[in-house]
Image (cartoon, rainbow, N blue to C red):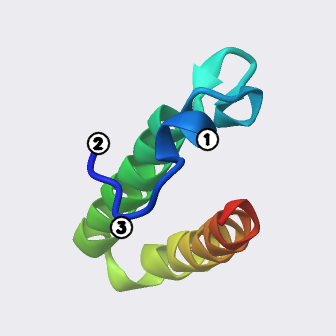
Amino acid sequence: MACPLSGCDTVLSSGYAQLFGVPLSLLGMLTYGSVVAAALVAQQQQQQDRSLLNTGLAAGVSVLAGVSGFLM
């Protein structure tokens, strides 16, 4: 992992770097990958079916941005 600051190893090996034994970086990668997959599915849907999926995507992205901001 590239880290421009000192102390990154300390943070990444601390107890705060994991949630229920799973690294936060893995959870983030899977979550953001799911959002990308859902966006691609929404793009393929008919216009009338797309509004609910877009609303869910907007809510999900807002929550992810809030959590990412909190963790930073």
Q: Residue at x 62, y 74 (%)?
A: 65
- Residue holding disc 2: 1
SS at badge 2 = loop
For badge 3, the amino acid type reads: Ala
Q: Nearer the viewer, mark 3 or mark 2?
A: 2
Q: CA distance from mark 3 to mark 2?
A: 28 Å
Query: Which disc is residue 52 wearing?
Result: none
- Residue holding disc 3: 39
Q: CA distance from mark 2 to mark 1?
A: 12 Å
Q: Residue at x 61, y 41 (%)?
A: 11
Q: CA distance from mark 3 to mark 1?
A: 32 Å
Pointer 1 local density, CA inside 10 Å: few below 14, some 14–19, many at least 20: few
Q: Does label 3 or label 1 sit earlier along the sequence?
A: 1
Residue 30 in the figure: left or right of residue 72: left
Residue 58 in the figure: left or right of residue 47: right
For badge 2, the amino acid type reads: Met
- Residue holding disc 1: 11
